[in-house]
Amino acid sequence: MLEHIPAAPPDAILGLSEAFKQDPHPHKINLGVGVFVDENGRTPILASVKAAEAALLAGAKSKSYMPIAGDPTYRTLVQELVLGAEHPVLAASRARTAQTPGGTAALRVGADFLRKFLPQATLWLSKPTWANHRGVFAAAGFPVKEYAYYNPATKGLDHTALLAALKQIPAGDVVLLHACCHNPTGVDLTTAQWQEVAAIAAERGWLPFVDFAYQGYGDGLDADRAGVLALAARCPELLIASSFSKNFGLYQDRTGALTLIAANAQAAATIFSNIEIAVRVNYSNPPAHGGLIVSHILTTPELKQQWLGELDAMRHHITGVRHQFVDALKQHGVPGDFSFIARQKGMFSFSGLSDAQVAWLRVERSIYIVGGGRINVAGITPQNIEYLCTAIAAMPKV
């Protein structure tokens, strides 16, 4: 019955990593998959995470199932991270959170829930967006359209086109927004621009769905909330998908959350009961380990301070790499102004490389970059920056 099924195409990002692993080139570079690496090219386990895991191992008494929505302490802590502990939404009990296996599962649970209760809605994505966004929402059954976001000519936000596009989205549709460290461009909205977007959402009546995968990687843990806070102040309802892969380094532990904000406490409880059904039929209940690590760190003062320092260090490291990359390109005589790379936020940069150049770098130099020219700048190290910039200087100008 199944022999006729053709092979699926490789994943645009994870498939690239598989090809990288098979490449025997001694100087190969992986700038595709979005993981933090330090100056030695390693993706470290944070010291705060190590300490939390040791404490959890020593005190563990059971591996029984989690509740459908996950650990209550974790869920409360996620809300405080996303909104701030004193936010009026929390005081009014308007928020509910489900612990999920990573940010991707948060997006999918939200998509399944919304598709069931908003069957006529269209899902809008920024142009461009993370490669998996379209797949997640299309798999849930959503028709997917795009709104203007990035201006290739300026290597920045197309502010006018963005606002014009958002003003045309019908009431009842769902708009996915990147809270910070936009993937793949690295181009973020200012606080004032977020206020404009929130005003449009409230006026037009479409539902914001915020992907908050990189909190702390942009301008800092609190500053990166600007978009969420602007939307929460104007919009009675929104969804927020959180991930702790990057800011806690819990990539393989798949630690995330889906947070609902509703118009009032009763509505939050009623609506969230349906999100729990979406969880139940997807994966029944979440894995515990990553969430317990996050909870232990955030409720242990010395570990929380240690984690905040580690998060700041990762953010500053990436900022430093951006400036080093810009300087190195100039030193190698690569034509053009690459200062935009230093202005972008987070792990990713739309480098301006064409698909033909991306292909050349892979075939001729074993440098792996996602189609469209998205570079994970965190993958640039003191050991590979010379080889990378030499290769870019030598590539054909197409």
Image (cartoon, helix red, strand yellow):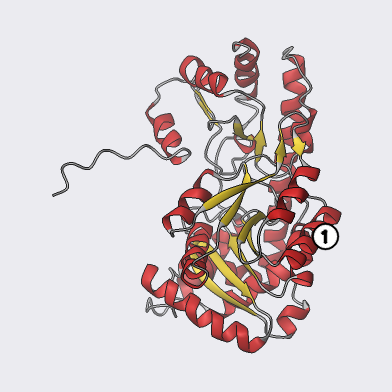
| Residue type (three-letter) at the residue carrying disc 1 | Gln
Asked whether residue 70 appears in the rendered view, the answer is no
- Residue 53 x %, y %: 51, 65
Q: State the image quarter where residue 77 is shown.
A: bottom right
Q: State the image quarter where residue 49 is shown.
A: bottom right
Rendered residue at 77%/62% (across/down): 198
- Residue 391 x %, y %: 60, 15
Residue that mark 1 sits on: 195
Seen from the viewer's position, the closer of residues 15 and 7 is 7
Seen from the viewer's position, the closer of residues 172 and 309 is 172
Rendered residue at 73%/43% (across/down): 345
Rendered residue at 43%/77% (across/down): 277
Seen from the viewer's position, the closer of residues 212 and 49 is 212
Image quarter hosting the C terminus = top right
Seen from the viewer's position, the closer of residues 296 and 77 is 77
* Marker count (numbered): 1
Image vertical order of residue 1 relative to residue 280, above or below: above
Image vertical order of residue 38 relative to residue 289, above or below: above
- Residue 109 x %, y %: 48, 66
Describe residue 81's horizontal placement relative to residue 136 as left or right: right
Asked whether residue 306 appears in the rendered view, the answer is yes
